[in-house]
Amino acid sequence: MDDPRGRVLYLDPFSGIAGDMFLGLLFNLGIDEAALVDELERLEVRFDLAVSQVHKSGIAAVSTRVTIPSGPDYDDESDVHYCDCDCDECGHGHDHHEDEDHTHNHHHSHHHAHHEDDPGDDAEAVPHGHGLTVDEILTILDRLSEPTRSKAKEMFQSLIEVEATVHGTASESVHLHEAGAIDAIVEVVGAVKGLELLGVDHVVCGLVNTGTGFAGMSHGTYPVPAPATAELLTGIPTRIDSFAETRKELVTPTGALILRHLVDEFAPISMTVTQVGYGAGKRDTTVPNVLRGFLGYSAAAEAPRRLALLESNIDDMNPQLFGNLMDALYRSGALDVFFTPIQMKKNRPATRVSVLGELHDKDLLVQLLMRESTTIGVRVSYPERYEAERSINEVEMEIGTAHVKLATYRGEIVNVSPEYESCRRLSTESGIPLKDVYRLVIEAAGGHMSATEEDK
């Protein structure tokens, strides 16, 4: 039976994140490799995907490498070459590496060119060839299945907009260079499809280490994080330190793209961990160059969730403005907004505005309160909230189908709440009073739940 709390992946990017690191992490956590390759074959482009076990500062991790083949050896019927073995059956080169602990580690890989989205060793950069235009990328992505296609296209559209902003040009005239190469497409599609194959319902991430220093790219030498990466990291909690060990590019554009579009929340988390995985980067450093991930289930039903509560007492604002203030707060990510009548000094009537939000949205919500109301001060506290898991179920009755919200706490159904709009529709269609429809739905839902429990 599936765990009612939902499957969660928590990312710990203490040594940054890149597309190959994220893909390696997914392989290490056990994605269905055949299903992933089947999806990648839909791209109808020629590439090699090498997957190998490596060691980073003594930690066993999975390394992935995407390369673009060339030459007569690839003039066959297959466009995609995939290998994760220690054999010579596919007819390509066999590299031999030695890790930092001097233990030999054989793996299959192909020679590849260094590019901007690989924060690897300090080898001289060799271009992959011409970059891909926006239309070329979107045409390739259109071959994918849903929902992978929509998410991957959304991510590259975002990258296009960021590139346009950085270069001061229109989106339609953007020509992606290294970030638009086939390897980046494979990594993004692999990331999207991989999460689906793992059955991950929610991705949470900790503080992101971006590294610092300078990095050479196609347009010149730029500070770390690179301009496009910096734009993509806007609004994401990051750490930029100056230790010699991290004076490198630790977050690539593809890594930032994954953070921006595939992570649901940047916050501490309570979870039951079932598996820990590591995706390897290309650097050999004292701090392991790996992306660590914790796979498991949310423990929200067993542990409190820490939020930010913002409050202001207002006695001089036009009452007509409160509705707009509430709407603006909800649009900016507030979880709950409520107004309480209070008495202030000199017995003046006033309104207490209370806003509940995620920790990472606190500063944005404070700024909005200052801008959209007449307050000149905001109090902040950090309450803990225990939450029941919620799901929407359908209940079949003689008068039609109704939706009900089921609340589950520690595996027990604690509340059944009919959905208003579906009940109102049934009331209108059947002529039965709405209050009676509510009663019928609750009774039917109770019987349905009992039958379901007996089936188990």
Image (spheres, rainbow, N blue to C red):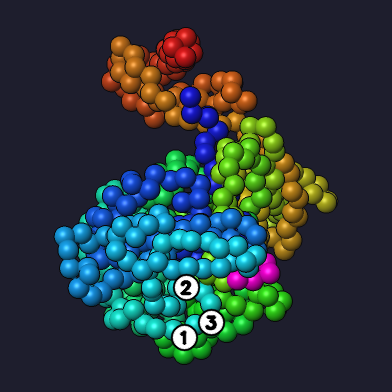
Distance between the Cα atoms at labels 2 and 3?
A: 11 Å
Pair 2/1: label in front = 1
Name which residue type carries label 2: Asp
In this view, 8 is above or below 436: below
Q: Residue at x 28, y 50 (%)?
A: 38
Neighbours of disc 2 within 10 Å: few (<14), some (14-19), many (20+): many
Indicate which disc residue 122 carries. Answer: 3
Distance between the Cα atoms at labels 3 and 1?
A: 6 Å
Indicate which disc residue 106 carries. Answer: none
- Residue 453 % position (x, y): 49, 13
Front in this rendered view, residue 294 or 157: 294
Residue located beneath label 2 in the image? 118
The magenta span reads 284-288
Indicate which disc residue 124 carries. Answer: 1
Name which residue type carries label 3: Asp
Chief SS of the magenta region? loop
Q: Residue at x 59, y 20 (%)?
A: 412
Horizontal placement of 43 versus 180: left or right? left
Q: Earlier in the sequence, mark 2 or mark 1?
A: 2
Q: Is residue 287 magenta?
A: yes
Neighbours of disc 1 within 10 Å: few (<14), some (14-19), many (20+): few
Neighbours of disc 3 within 10 Å: few (<14), some (14-19), many (20+): few
Distance between the Cα atoms at labels 2 and 1?
A: 12 Å
- Residue 362 % position (x, y): 65, 57
- Residue 31 % position (x, y): 43, 46
In this view, 211 is above or below 263: below
- Residue 442 % position (x, y): 47, 15
